[in-house]
Amino acid sequence: MILEGKKAIWNDYQKEIADDKYYYVRSCVRQNFFPGSETAFLKIMREELKKEVYEHPCHTSCTGIGYHSDIVPVETTMTVVARQFAIMTEAGYENLVPSCITSFGLYTEILDTWHHFPEVEKKIRLQLKKATGREFKKPKNLAHASDVIYKFRKEIAAKAKYKLINKKTGEPLKVVDHIGCHYAKMFPSKGVGGAEYPYVLAGMIEEWGGKIIDYPERRHCCGFGFRQYLVQANRGFSIACSKEKFESMEPFKPDMIITNCPGCPMFLDRWQYVINEMEGKRYGQNGEGIPVFTYEEVAGLVLGYDPWELGLQMHQTDCEPVLDKIGVDYSPEDKYNLEIIPSFSEKHNLINV
Amino acid sequence: MDKFGFTISAGRQIDYDSNNRRLAEYIFEKEPSFRLCIECGGCSATCTTANFTGFSLRELHILIKRGENDQVRQNLNKCMLCGKCTLVCPRGVNTRNIVVLAKNAFQKSDEYEI
Amino acid sequence: MSKHVVVIGGGVAGLEVAGQLSKAGIEVSVIEKEINTGGHLNNWYRLFPDRRDSSEVKEYLDGMTHNHGINLLTNTTIEVFKRNTSHFLITTNGGKELTADAIIIATGFDLFKSSRKEEYGYGIYDNVITSVDLEKMFRKGKIALTNQTVPETIGIIHCVGSRDEKVGNFYCSKLCCVTAVKQAIEIREFLPDSKVFCFYMDMRMGGAFYEELYREAQEKWGVNFIRGKVSEASETIENKLLIKVEDTLAGRPLKMKLDMLVLMAGMEMSEDGEKIAGIVGLKTGENRFFAATDNLIGSNRSNIDGVFYAGSCTAPMNIPETISHARAAVVEVIDYLNDGIR
């Protein structure tokens, strides 16, 4: 591996990421899958980085799941997205930050479609006006929430309590980064590092002390992909995708996986349990699984947030091996203690505190 | 299966490194013209069997070369050994002999001779 | 008074044009940006189809220039280009001024920059090399991996930067297929225990004796040909290259580990050619190469009277085609100089 070659590509794919005054839109599913992640993002942005992040209660699903499952027609999707833009415009914001990779991909795709087919944009504007009376400006800057954390990775490192380093051995943790397909595969120029050698998560990991593993199936889908999961009969295909990735990364002995998509951590985490149930196989060290994290969870850990406040007890593949390696100060007995959870999330569950 | 309602799908990829290509090596050695195939499909187009069943001699050649031996074995006996394919081949591959050699090889491998 | 022709480019086409014009009694200057003449020929070890050493062709071309008193300006580029009623005025980077009755553009091609096909990892993975890198290894007499061991399995990817909309090149570079076949044979000669796999979209063996070479590669050297465009390469923990390709003739995806991957880089309009097109005002085509005014009977003619093309600055060409095209350019120039029109 020649690092200089990768660096050259990373330099080729840098994108503009707004500096402040973000309009944040949540994912449909992440609050169920990884309930601490979005609140951790808000806490980091507002309290650690002192940035302005605004949320609006009228924000809805972007319909991405329905769109990618052939349930919602594209024009409907575009009109719903136009409404999100309108709400942002009304609130006086222009830097859109979606939490979801598929929303990010969908917004990017729609803006690109309108760029090439202005008549479609005109039609959608008309439809939105008729349906809701609303008008909108297109976002000035569109960045995924992981782009924003990437942008401030050094600031986070400066405030870090822990590093992604094995406390006992002093070695950097070996981290697999997994990027959501809709982040850059459709529009490589819209992703930090492009589609082939994405840097958005790798940059965070490097900055926070870990070491990225480049394994052969790094580009492969996690297995979510909406339609291969939605129908039960297809789930064998979904889990086979995850399995292919685990088998490919296994020889590199990864300590953990970091992801930036709603579906990927869900599937990489849960399928490890299912594979073990079906085949009695685990891919981590010492008969354990490979813990899977969202980038907000990793940022939160590095900043010293309590693992249970971050919601890590919701992982099906236990995260403790990583906590122990890093040397995180946590109380194992509080893992399922519901009393402590609101102390962290109370404030940030409220919109625009 | 009972527990989840599905099982992990098997891969469709040809895994070249783990496949056994002894059959291919055997045929290369006995019938060097096997190397000359350019996959034009002339053999399959003229083949009586190919016109009425899913058999393809062209594909059979590829499967042998890749070491997909189970599939070769499943399809081999569909050939009626008429030899018309050999008449057609622009590269002078002795196509009929390849089928004969494959049959021999399977017989021998059953008897652990190759 | 003898006429003066300036040839831009001192590769195969430029030197052939210069030599032939000089033989016909015309005064010739050759402008070459590099220190040495010969262009891409200097990077090649042996030439298809009969695998002659490239130095033999180089010797012939050097003979043409030395024996006929050509004014050779190496390490030279064009800064200013002007035309008055009957002459062209050129100022070089060194401030030298040349007056010419006619100009021949022989700027050749650039090799496609293989790092642009990011998925193959050229410049990132240790043992991904290009056809040119392999020729250099042949010249040194040693094919080795970065850890200095000998590769056992070698994959050759055809059409890198050719027939590929993703890099903006729709056209076929025409020579890479036969180069792949030639190099596959040479690898097998150097390393008799190696296994070589060519991954191709189509085998375009259109030149004289190409198909014969392909057949020889199959029959004598046991080179394996797998039809399919390699979609990606990655590095395994044992530092091998794992490739994914569809075996289109089996109708199934295929994966394979290789020790070394050789990319058959295609041909592109040269960057300097593009600059010259801008300075001189020459038209280029959809493929970005110089556009001839007539693709059938005037492939040497440009949109400017008195400016002619020779060789692969107009389209990918092999050496015999380049030589023929250069000689045709000579006829066009002589005709022009005699008539004063074209």
Image (tube, helix red, strand yellow):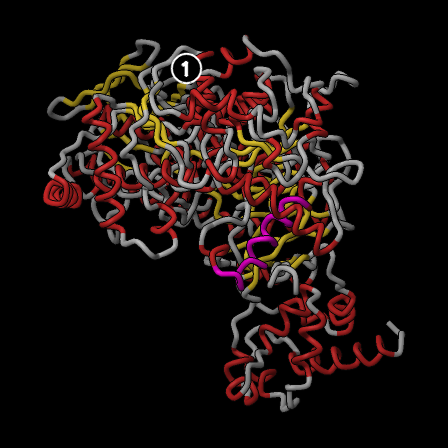
Please state if C183 lies on the left or on the right of A261 as rendered.
right
Q: Is residue C312 above or below residue C184?
A: above
Please state if C294 lies on the left or on the right of B78 as rendered.
left
Q: Position of residue C11 (x, y in %)?
A: 44, 32
Q: Quadrant of the N terminus of chain A?
A: top right
Task: Report the span colored magenta.
Answer: A231-246
Q: Position of residue C72 (x, y in %)?
A: 41, 21
Q: Is residue C257 above or below residue A192?
A: below
Whether residue C250 is visible to the viewer of this picture, yes or no, is yes
Q: Main secondary structure of the magenta part?
A: helix
Q: Position of residue A155 (x, y in %)?
A: 49, 11
**Toward the viewer: A332 or A287?**
A332
Point out the residue furthest to the front here: A339
Element class at badge 1? helix
Does A233 appear in magenta?
yes
Q: Position of residue A349 (x, y in %)?
A: 42, 26
Does A322 appear in magenta?
no
Whether residue C207 is visible to the viewer of this picture, yes or no, is no
Please state if A208 lies on the left or on the right of B69 as rendered.
left
Name the quadrant containing residue C9.
Answer: top left
Q: At 71% across and 27% down in the image, what residue appears? A: A333
Dot 1 surroundings within 10 Å: few (below 14), some, or many (20 or more)? some
Please state if A114 lies on the left or on the right of C263 as rendered.
left
**Toward the viewer: B28 or C27?**
B28
Residue bearing mark 1: A46
**Toward the viewer: C45 or A136?**
A136
Q: At 26% across and 37% down in the image, what residue appears? A: A111
